[in-house]
Structures are given as C-alpha cells and as structure tokens.
C-alpha cells in the first residue's frame, strides 16, 4: 500500500492529535505560504488585529542577522491560514484569543499591545508564553492562544523563502544521505 505526501502529512497530524497542529497542516497543504513584505493589506483581520499580529510575530521571531517574521511575510501568512484553513469555530476561537491577549495587555499596562514600547511588548509576550506553557489562559477547547500564535509564526517563517534559505540550511537538490554528522560541520538545520 503506497501513500502520497499529502496523505502522510494528514495522518501525521491525526497521530499528533494537536487541535492546533491539524488546521496548520491543512493550511500548508492548501498552499498557504508567507509572502515577504512588512506592509500588507489585511482582508480578514481589522487594522488593530493586524497591528497586534505583526508586532507579536516580530517579538516571537525578531530581526537579527536574518529578517524577522514581519519581513518574511508571516502576518499575511497567519491571516491566510486563519481565513482559509480554519473553520468558522476555529476562526472565532482565534479572534477571541487575540482579543483576550490584547485585553490582558491593556489591563497590565494601560494600553493596547501594539501601542506598548518594544521592551514592554517583549516582557508581556514572555510572561504570556510562560503562562501558556504552564496551562493558563486556555480557551474552552483547552488551547492557549499564545501557543497557537507561536505555532503559526514558526510555521509561516520556516516555510517562507527567508526562513528556508537564510535561517535554515537549504540545498535545492541535497547530496547523499549521511545520518550521523556533527552539527558543527553542518552549521544549520536542514530546510528540506
């Protein structure tokens, strides 16, 4: 019995069982890809939501010696994923999580997340990450918004051209398989 790549990814998503992972895998299968550019015109998110997603994705993967999430087109990728790969319930769950995240920022710092200083944004995001890993701020499905946002950011970044070619080690046609190579010799994790 043979299995094609899409079927293998679908089965892996089912085995992993992740409520968050499955919609993301299906979005990639539908062809959602990050398109580079900091300036994007949101169609599904309102302007405030788009600003929050842009700032938060750039806190998760900032500009360093390689471009960050926003420059790699991750915010537009997240919008495409949520608007096309998520069903209506999952979309509403994501939007509720986004609003709750912003409300927590407003309660803690007196301003919307996108209007906070970058240092305060980073510290608040770090606190939310720790809380999410600790099982706090779960929605009715038992999912933490921040972990879902991190997953979408990482998926969008590492499936973008910038993530695959500049951050990971990319070879269009890799050479022979060598299963045991010291990481120091390779220098980067493989993109493909």
Image (cartoon, grey):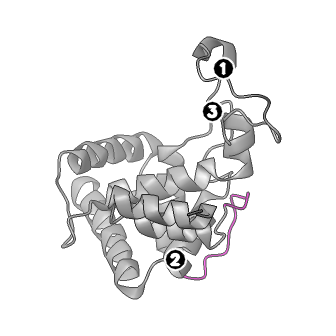
Q: Is residue 167 magenta?
A: no
Mark 1 crowd level (few <14, some 14–19, many ≥20, 10 Å Cα): few
In this rendering, does residue 111 appear at all? Answer: no
* Secondary structure of residue under mark 3: loop
The structure residue drawn at horizontal position 52% and vertical position 77%, both measured from the top left corner, is 85
Q: Nearer the viewer, residue 54 or 138?
A: 138
What label sits on residue 85 in the rendered view? Answer: 2
Going from the N terminus, do you reach mark 1 or mark 2 first?
Answer: 2
Going from the N terminus, do you reach mark 3 or mark 2 first?
Answer: 3
What label sits on residue 187 in the rendered view? Answer: 1
The structure residue drawn at horizontal position 62% and vertical position 12%, both measured from the top left corner, is 184
Q: Quadrant of residue 18?
A: bottom left
Going from the N terminus, do you reach mark 1 or mark 3 first?
Answer: 3
Q: CA distance from mark 1 to mark 3?
A: 17 Å
Q: CA distance from mark 3 to mark 2?
A: 30 Å
Quick one: quadrant of the C terminus? top right
Q: Which residues are magenta?
A: 34-44
Q: Position of residue 17 (x, y in %)?
A: 32, 61
Horizontal side, residue 18 vs residue 58: left or right: left
In this picture, is 189 found above or below 52? above
What label sits on residue 131 in the rendered view? Answer: none
Quick one: quadrant of the N terminus? bottom right
Residue found farthest to the bottom: 88
Is there a contact, CB below 8 Å, between mark 1 and mark 2?
Answer: no
Q: Position of residue 74 (x, y in %)?
A: 60, 58
The structure residue drawn at horizontal position 62% and vertical position 64%, both measured from the top left corner, is 4
What label sits on residue 64 in the rendered view? Answer: 3
Observer-side mark, 1 or 3, equals 1
* Secondary structure of residue under mark 1: loop
Observer-side mark, 3 or 2, equals 2
Q: Position of residue 87 (x, y in %)?
A: 43, 84
């Amino acid at each position: 019995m043979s299995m094609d790549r899409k079927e293998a990814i679908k089965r892996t998503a089912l085995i992993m069982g992740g409520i968050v992972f499955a919609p993301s895998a299906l979005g990639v299968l539908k062809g959602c890809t990050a398109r580079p550019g900091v300036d994007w015109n949101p169609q599904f998110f309102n302007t405030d939501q788009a600003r929050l997603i842009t700032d938060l994705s750039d806190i998760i993967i900032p500009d360093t010696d390689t471009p960050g999430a926003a420059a790699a087109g991750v915010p537009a990728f997240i919008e495409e994923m949520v608007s096309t790969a998520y069903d209506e319930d999952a979309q509403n769950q994501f939007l509720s999580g986004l609003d709750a995240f912003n409300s927590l920022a407003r309660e803690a710092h007196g301003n919307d997340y996108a209007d906070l200083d970058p240092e305060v944004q980073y510290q608040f995001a770090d606190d939310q990450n720790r809380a999410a890993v600790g099982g706090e701020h779960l929605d009715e499905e038992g999912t933490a918004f921040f972990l879902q946002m991190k997953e979408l950011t990482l998926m969008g970044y590492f499936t973008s051209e910038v993530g695959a070619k500049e951050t990971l080690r990319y070879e269009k046609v890799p050479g022979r398989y060598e299963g045991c190579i010291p990481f120091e010799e390779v220098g980067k994790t493989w993109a493909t």
